[in-house]
Image (spheres, rainbow, N blue to C red):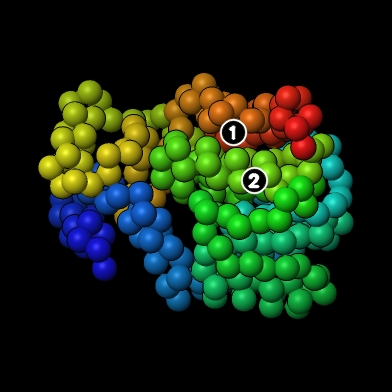
């Protein structure tokens, strides 16, 4: 265990304000491992891979986003497979689904639950912040709820989207969901303390306002500005064809398409 991961876990055991410093004490690689460790625990596998949760299928707001996709079939890459809650109904709609998750036990659970429903899907174990994908293969890339926000730092999220751009067919679409919660943004004083803590601990110099440890269990970057989200999409070569916020769920969604200039390069 790295020093910074150890320090982050130690701070989480302290008071509420000190606990909030854990996100700046851990570096981006530590935050990724922190989240991965949580989802590999048996309790998380049981929660996200429960038959009841998976049987619930897509939520209404997720269905509304899927309805906005121009593609009604083809190869779909699902980032954040979990136990198959999204993968199974998407396959039943006619998509050829490949699901990716960083928790091997969740991938195995999703494949088993899909087989129980008579649905065939493919499952891969990968870190979504460092995807290894074939070029121009997928018609749709689908981010599971808030999965985009689980990647720390703007630079890494843009890099991830660039990898996805390479794996997407020129006329394909990305359905991106992200965590939306302007209320978690720190005030000026708190922001200065967080940045000072990052310096003193030689920790997360990539800290951004909106970075939190959700429930003390996983890293999440909460977006609070439409411009912030759209600018990341644009940097990666995408344009936003549809945008929606679902504030009751603390999330937003967008349908992305390659910009004309990017599409012509494919």
Secondary structure beneath dot 1 equals loop
For residue 188, which quarter of the picture? top left
Task: Give the residue at mark 1.
Answer: 236
Residue 144 x %, y %: 61, 51
Q: In this view, does 49 lie to the left or right of 71?
A: left
* Farthest residue, direction front: 265
User: Are discs 1 and 2 less than 8 Å apart at CB?
Assistant: yes
Q: In this view, does 205 lie to the left or right of 40?
A: left
Crowd around label 2: few <14 · some 14–19 · many ≥20 (10 Å)? many
Quarter of the image where the C terminus is located:
top right
- What separation in Å lies between label 1 and label 2 (alpha carbons)? 9 Å
Camera sees residue 62: no
- Residue found at x 76% / y 76%: 115
Secondary structure beneath dot 2 equals helix
Check residue 116 in the rendering and tell me which mark sits there, or answer none: none
Q: Which of 183/232 is in front? A: 232
Q: Earlier in the sequence, mark 1 or mark 2?
A: 2
Q: Is residue 20 left or right of residue 209?
A: left
- Residue found at x 76% / y 60%: 97
For residue 218, which quarter of the picture? bottom left
56 vs 252: above or below: below
Task: Give the residue at mark 2.
Answer: 164
Residue 217 x %, y %: 36, 58
Residue 116 x %, y %: 75, 78
Quarter of the image where the N terminus is located:
bottom left
91 vs 204: above or below: below
Q: Which of 39/184 is in front? A: 39
Residue 8 x %, y %: 23, 55
- Residue found at x 33% / y 39%: 206
């Amino acid at each position: 265990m790295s020093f910074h991961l150890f320090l982050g876990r130690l701070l989480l055991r302290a008071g509420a304000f000190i606990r909030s410093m854990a996100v700046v004490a851990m570096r981006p690689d530590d935050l990724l491992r922190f989240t991965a460790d949580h989802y590999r625990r048996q309790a998380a596998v049981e929660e996200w891979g429960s038959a009841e949760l998976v049987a619930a299928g897509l939520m209404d707001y997720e269905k509304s986003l899927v309805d906005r996709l121009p593609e009604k079939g083809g190869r779909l890459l699902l980032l954040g497979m979990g136990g198959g809650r999204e993968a199974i109904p998407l396959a039943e709609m006619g998509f050829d689904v490949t699901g990716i998750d960083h928790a091997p036990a969740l991938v195995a659970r999703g494949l088993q639950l899909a087989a129980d429903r008579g649905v065939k899907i493919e499952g891969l174990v990968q870190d979504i912040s460092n995807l290894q994908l074939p070029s121009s293969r997928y018609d749709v890339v689908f981010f599971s709820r808030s999965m985009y926000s689980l990647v720390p730092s703007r630079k890494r999220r843009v890099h991830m989207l660039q990898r996805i751009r390479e794996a997407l067919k020129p006329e394909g679409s990305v359905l991106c969901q992200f965590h939306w919660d302007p209320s978690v943004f720190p005030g000026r004083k708190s922001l200065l303390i967080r940045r000072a803590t990052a310096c003193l601990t030689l920790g997360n110099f990539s800290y951004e306002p909106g970075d939190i440890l959700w429930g003390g269990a996983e890293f999440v970057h909460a977006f609070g500005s439409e411009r912030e989200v759209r600018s990341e999409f644009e940097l990666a070569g995408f344009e936003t064809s549809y945008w929606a916020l679902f504030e009751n769920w603390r999330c937003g969604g967008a349908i992305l398409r390659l910009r004309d200039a990017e599409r012509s390069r494919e």
